[in-house]
Amino acid sequence: MTLHALQNLDRRWVFLMMLLAVAIPTLMDLRFPERPSALSQAVYDRVEALPQGSRVLLALDYDPGSEGEIAPMAAALVHHCARRGAKMYFVTLWPAGTGMITQVLSRVIAADLPHLVYGRDFVNLGFQTGNEGIIKLMASDLPRTFPTDARGAPLSSLPIMEGVASLRDMDLVVALSSGNPGAKEWVQYGVSACPGDFEFVAGCTGVQAPQLYPYVPQQISGLLAAIKGAAEYEQLVFPDGSRREARRRMGPQLIAHLLMVGLIIAGNGVYFSARRAASRREASR
């Protein structure tokens, strides 16, 4: 292909290449081995170290727009917590997060873990308006912050709430978020209010990860960043490949990223080639 043709390449060819880069790996179910990073390994190690009957609060602070990145993390974490015999307390600071909790309860617990009993092994505390203020209230008085569960049942009637007075009674807090309020606010208003009382790990979208790295490892013990972190954690929890939702999405992402890098290199090559050709023409005059 000549330099002139590359300079005037119809952008629709680029769109077609990107379509194929995503569609072909998806249709062929291409999978690549995942090597867990230290941050993903740290999340796994914190959950794996939980003794039987530990309390884990899972804050699902995201909406359907971020479900693709974070839902696989939530599914793997629920499976891992259930495997360790932990009690799970679901909560959200986002109105749309109630639907995300419902989705996890139906697609993961009801479908894959039917032996878990509501009110004994897990509970849905639901949503309360107030953003980070809710975290501050939970740090001092959780039952007062959530007097009932998402179904309207008094918390005092649920066996899982026995001995739970505040965030300080949790063994592990997990924040899965895609914005504000989210993991950063859990650090600022939860971890800082209860120093040393519980372990804290987080999962987030790729664009939010740079905001959280400064808190690792002092405030955040482990971090799952974007679909890559979800795939790494999934590899640790399901080494046999029995569940591979995140890993299935890594193939199209890898090929698409390679295409983008190739196009950037090609674009720069065309630009500098055009400059050299223009300089030669100018010199020949």
Image: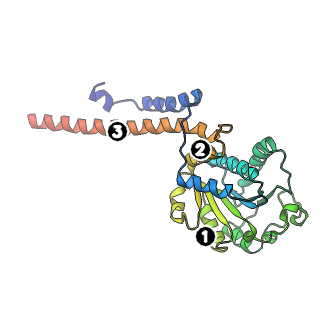
Amino acid bearing label 2: Ala
- Along the polypeptide, which appears first: circle 2 or circle 1? 1
Disc number placed over residue 231 in the picture, else none:
2
Query: What is the quadrant of the N terminus in the image?
Result: top left
Position of residue 281 measured from the top left corner of the image (x, y, whole percent): 14, 34
The residue carrying mark 3 is 265
Q: Nearer the viewer, residue 114 or 97?
A: 114
Give me the C-alpha separation between circle 3 and circle 2: 28 Å
- CB atoms of marks 2 and 1 within 8 Å: no
Judged by depth in the image, the label closer to the viewer, 2 or 1, is 2
Which residue is at a point 66% across and 54% down the rendered structure image?
62
Q: Nearer the viewer, residue 132 or 53?
A: 53
Display colour scheme: rainbow
Please give left or right for residue 273 compared with residue 279 in the image: right
Amino acid bearing label 1: Gln
Which residue is at a point 43% across and 28% down the rendered structure image?
13
- CB atoms of marks 3 and 1 within 8 Å: no
Position of residue 162 measured from the top left corner of the image (x, y, whole percent): 85, 66
Disc number placed over residue 188 in the picture, else none:
1
Does the rendering let one see residue 282? yes
Please give left or right for residue 193 compared with residue 275 in the image: right
Helix, strand, or loop for circle 2? Answer: helix
* Rendered view: 7 above or below 187: above
Count of marks, rendered view = 3
Helix, strand, or loop for circle 1? Answer: helix
Helix, strand, or loop for circle 3? Answer: helix
Q: Residues within 10 Å of mark 1 (few under 14, many from 20)?
A: some
Please give left or right for residue 124 compared with residue 210 in the image: right
Which residue is at a point 75% across and 63% down the rendered structure image?
128
- Along the polypeptide, which appears first: circle 3 or circle 2? 2
Amino acid bearing label 3: Ile
